[in-house]
Image: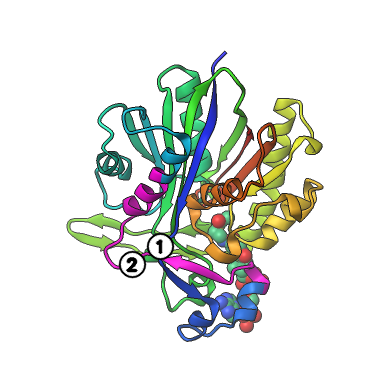
Amino acid sequence: MTYSRIIGTGSYLPEKVLTNHDLEKIVDTTHEWIVTRSGISERHLVAEGELTSDLALQASRRAMEAAGVTAEDIDLIIVATTTPDQVFPSTACILQDKLGVRQGVAFDVQAVCSGFIYALNTADLYIRGGQARTALVVGAEALTRLLDWTDRSTCVLFGDGAGAVVLQASEQPGILGAKLHADGRHRGMLKAEARINNGQIEGSPYMYMDGQAVFKFAVKVLAEVVDELLADLNLGYADINWLVPHQANIRIIEATAKKLGMGMDKVVLTVGEHGNTSAASIPLALDTAVRAGRIQPGQNVLLEAVGGGFVWGAVLVKW
Ligand code: ACO
């Protein structure tokens, strides 16, 4: 039987750091308010002219180096992003060119904060179905370009960055299972409505979020989807060694960990230093934990996310 295994991780954060104290000078907020409500102390911001594919390129090179693979080995590239470089071609095709990959398949996945989970599941299906052998799965965002810097309810929560994994066919179990959902009825809770028409932008190009509604929805569905996935796999909470959640808000993460009966020492947390980087947040957090030597071979790592759409899901990975 063919499985897919993560054989390398990488990540990249843009140079510029914006702290909560910096934000105090931009909008009517305080470090105290932001940390208490979200757990965020600082976030990274893309530089002028720095594109999502540039962040993806750095993260991908690091993941490929860690995996010991070259451009000749990659036969599938999936980039999860809500902030592509341009309308088309896809950021995955731009990344493919920058990496010097000349074969295989490349496309983007748009599932906002759940993008990496969706992309990982898709790559797993490609590999298990025999259509790919070595996949590069990337979450990359220049999300701060969608922020209205006069709206204190959103601009304090988000950041930019990229994370990547190399997934390869193996006889040994790697990705154990995935459970994904979408419910478009809730699409109004979190959105950026802008569309291009006849050379003009129609609708707001800024992010809108009903924070309290998102919070309640996220806590509910994350707990449910983990239960569904574990039931499918005939496993229990005790079988999970690490939780690597989408890094949106520490209070959502704490609520999920409590439901799973996990101590916060088993939860990988980067939201404090990265903010919410949407599709990039899980691979960024995963790479941080892997490089710190926290995640060890044989351990079960649970990834979970929820985001605009609404879309949500969980993936269990044997390391
Ligand atoms: N600084 C200071 N005060 C603020 C700020 C700010 N940055 N933003 C809002 N406030 C004020 C509000 O105006 C309000 O004032 P009022 O009582 O005078 O009207 C007060 O703080 C309370 O606002 P609430 O919205 O009720 O604050 P809440 O406790 O709900 O926290 C937050 C807001 C942090 C957005 C919370 O609802 C939340 O975390 N929601 C989830 C959002 C999230 O995770 N989004 C990520 C995207 S989706 C995803 O990735 C899952």
Q: Could you tell me residue 185's position as x and y percent? A: 53, 47
Type of the residue with mark 2: Ala
Residues tagged 1 and 2 counted as in contact (Cβ below 8 A): yes
Horizontal placement of 238 versus 107: left or right? right
**Residue stretch rendered in magenta on the structure:** 36-61
| Residue highlighted by disc 1 | 14
- Dot 2 surroundings within 10 Å: few (below 14), some, or many (20 or more)? few
Horizontal placement of 316 versus 63: left or right? right
**Numbered marks: total:** 2
Toward the left, the furthest residue is 199
Please tell me which residue is depicted at 70% across the width and 39% down the height of the picture.
226
Type of the residue with mark 1: Pro
Of residues 241 and 8, the one nearer the viewer is 8
In three-dimensional space, the C-alpha distance between marks 1 and 2, rounded to whole angstroms, equals 7 Å
Quadrant including the N terminus: top right
Q: Is residue 54 visible in the rendered structure shown here? A: yes
Identify whether 251 is placed above or below 176: below
The quadrant holding residue 224 is: top right
Quadrant including the C terminus: top right
